[in-house]
C-alpha cells in the first residue's frame, strides 16, 4: 500500500470505529496528514476535552495518551506504540516528588504537562510551555513553588516573573542537542531570518534566539510575521505543520539532529494496526486519574 492508500484506510477505519485521531506536531509528516487534529500539548489537551467520539487514537508519547485518558474516563484511548515514552517525564517519579514536597511543606507543586500521571497526581497545577507564564502569574508573590520536571522551562518562567522556584533537574534530551554554534551557523546561512526556540531549551540557547515560543506559538509567529524565512530550533516534525500553514514562507531547522526518536515511533503501519485491532488501550489507576485531573482541570480553567 502507498501512504495515500494507508491514510485512506486509516480514515475509513476511524469512521467505522467512531474514532478521532490526534497527532502531536512532532509526529512524522504522514501521520500528521492522517490525523483529524494536530497540535502541541496545550492544543491537544484542550481538544481532548471537546471530543464527542467514543475512541481517541493518540499519536504522540505515552504521557499525552494518559492525559487524554484522564480527561475522558468513559472513552477508549489508544496509542499505536505504547513504548513511545518521554525521557524527561521519566526523570521524576511520584515518590521522588512526594519526598521533595516533604522537604518543603506548604510549597505548591507545579508540573509541566510532560510528566506522568502519577506526578500530575502529586501536583496542584499543570502547565504547558504555551500557557506557563500566564498560569504561573496566578500564584501569590510569597508562595513557595516547586516546579517539575523541566528545569529550563521553570527557570525561564521564574526569570520572566522575577521569582525563584525549587527546580527539578529534568530536561528534554532532544532540545539538549541544540547548541549556540548551530544557531550561529543557521543565522550565517540564512541572514535576517528570525530564530525561534522553545523555553524548554537551556538559557544560553534561549538567549541566542529571537523568540522563545511553544510549538503553537511558533505556528502563530509564522502566520503573523512578515519574515519570508524562519529558522526553527525545535524537533523537526513541526516543519511539516509550519509549511502547510504558511506555504509562502521557507523554514529551516537549526539542526537536523533535533529528532525525538520516541515521537517517530508512530507510523502509518502501527496506526492502521491500532485501529484494526483496537490496541493498545491506555488506562490510568482511578485514584491517580482523579488526583491528576484536578491539576489538569486547574490549568484548563485558567485558559
Image (cartoon, rainbow, N blue to C red):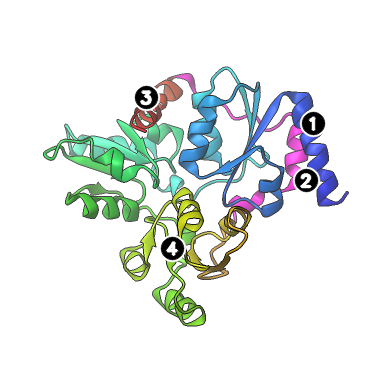
**Foreground disc of the pair 3, 4:** 4
Q: Nearer the viewer, residue 236 or 189?
A: 189
State the residue position of label 2: 269
> Residue 50's quadrant in the figure?
top right
Alpha-carbon distance for marks 1 and 3? 34 Å
Q: Which label's residue is closer to the chain start, 2 or 3?
A: 2
Instruction: Residue at 50% x, 53% y: name it.
Output: 219
**Foreground disc of the pair 4, 2:** 4
Alpha-carbon distance for marks 1 and 4? 38 Å
Alpha-carbon distance for marks 4 and 2? 32 Å
Pointers 1 and 2 in contact (CB under 8 A)?
no
Pointers 2 and 3 in contact (CB under 8 A)?
no
Q: Which label's residue is closer to the chain start, 1 or 2?
A: 1
Magenta residue span: 261-286
State the residue position of label 4: 196
**Residue 215's spot in the image, x, y percent?**
48, 51
Pointers 3 and 4 in contact (CB under 8 A)?
no
Alpha-carbon distance for marks 1 and 2? 13 Å
**Foreground disc of the pair 1, 4:** 4
| Label 4 packing within 10 angstroms: few (<14), some (14-19), many (20+) | many
State the residue position of label 3: 294
State the residue position of label 1: 13
Looking at the rendered structure, the secondary structure element under dot 4 is strand
Instruction: Residue at 38% x, 29% y: name it.
Output: 121
Regarding residue 10, the answer to whether it shows in the image is yes
Q: Which label's residue is closer to the chain start, 1 or 4?
A: 1
Amino acid at each position: 500500500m502507498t501512504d495515500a492508500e494507508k491514510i485512506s484506510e486509516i480514515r475509513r477505519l476511524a469512521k467505522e470505529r467512531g474514532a478521532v485521531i490526534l497527532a502531536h506536531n512532532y509526529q512524522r509528516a504522514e501521520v500528521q496528514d492522517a490525523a483529524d487534529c494536530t497540535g502541541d500539548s496545550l492544543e491537544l489537551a484542550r481538544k481532548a476535552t471537546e471530543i464527542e467520539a467514543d475512541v481517541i487514537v493518540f499519536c504522540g508519547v505515552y504521557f499525552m495518551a494518559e492525559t487524554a485518558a484522564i480527561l475522558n474516563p468513559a472513552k477508549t484511548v489508544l496509542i499505536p506504540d505504547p513504548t513511545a515514552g518521554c525521557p524527561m517525564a521519566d526523570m521524576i517519579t511520584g515518590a521522588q516528588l512526594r519526598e521533595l514536597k516533604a522537604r518543603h511543606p506548604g510549597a505548591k507543586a507545579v508540573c509541566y504537562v510532560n510528566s506522568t500521571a502519577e506526578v500530575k497526581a502529586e501536583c496542584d497545577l499543570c502547565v504547558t510551555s504555551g500557557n506557563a507564564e500566564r498560569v504561573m502569574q496566578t500564584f501569590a508573590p510569597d508562595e513557595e513553588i516547586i516546579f517539575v520536571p523541566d528545569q529550563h522551562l521553570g527557570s525561564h518562567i521564574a526569570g520572566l516573573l522575577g521569582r525563584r522556584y525549587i527546580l527539578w533537574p529534568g530536561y528534554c534530551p532532544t532540545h539538549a542537542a541544540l547548541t549556540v554554534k548551530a544557531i550561529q551557523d543557521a543565522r550565517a546561512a540564512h541572514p535576517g531570518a528570525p530564530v525561534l526556540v522553545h523555553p524548554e531549551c537551556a538559557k544560553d540557547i534561549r538567549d541566542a534566539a529571537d523568540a522563545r515560543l511553544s510549538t503553537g506559538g511558533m505556528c502563530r509567529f509564522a502566520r503573523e510575521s512578515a519574515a519570508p524565512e524562519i529558522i526553527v530550533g525545535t524537533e523537526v516534525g513541526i516543519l511539516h505543520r509550519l509549511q502547510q500553514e504558511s506555504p509562502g514562507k521557507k523554514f529551516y531547522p537549526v539542526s537536523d539532529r533535533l529528532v525525538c526518536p520516541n515521537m517517530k515511533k508512530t507510523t502509518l503501519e502501527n496506526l492502521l494496526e491500532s485501529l484494526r485491532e483496537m490496541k493498545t488501550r491506555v488506562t490510568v489507576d482511578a485514584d491517580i486519574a482523579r488526583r491528576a485531573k484536578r491539576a489538569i482541570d486547574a490549568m484548563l480553567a485558567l485558559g
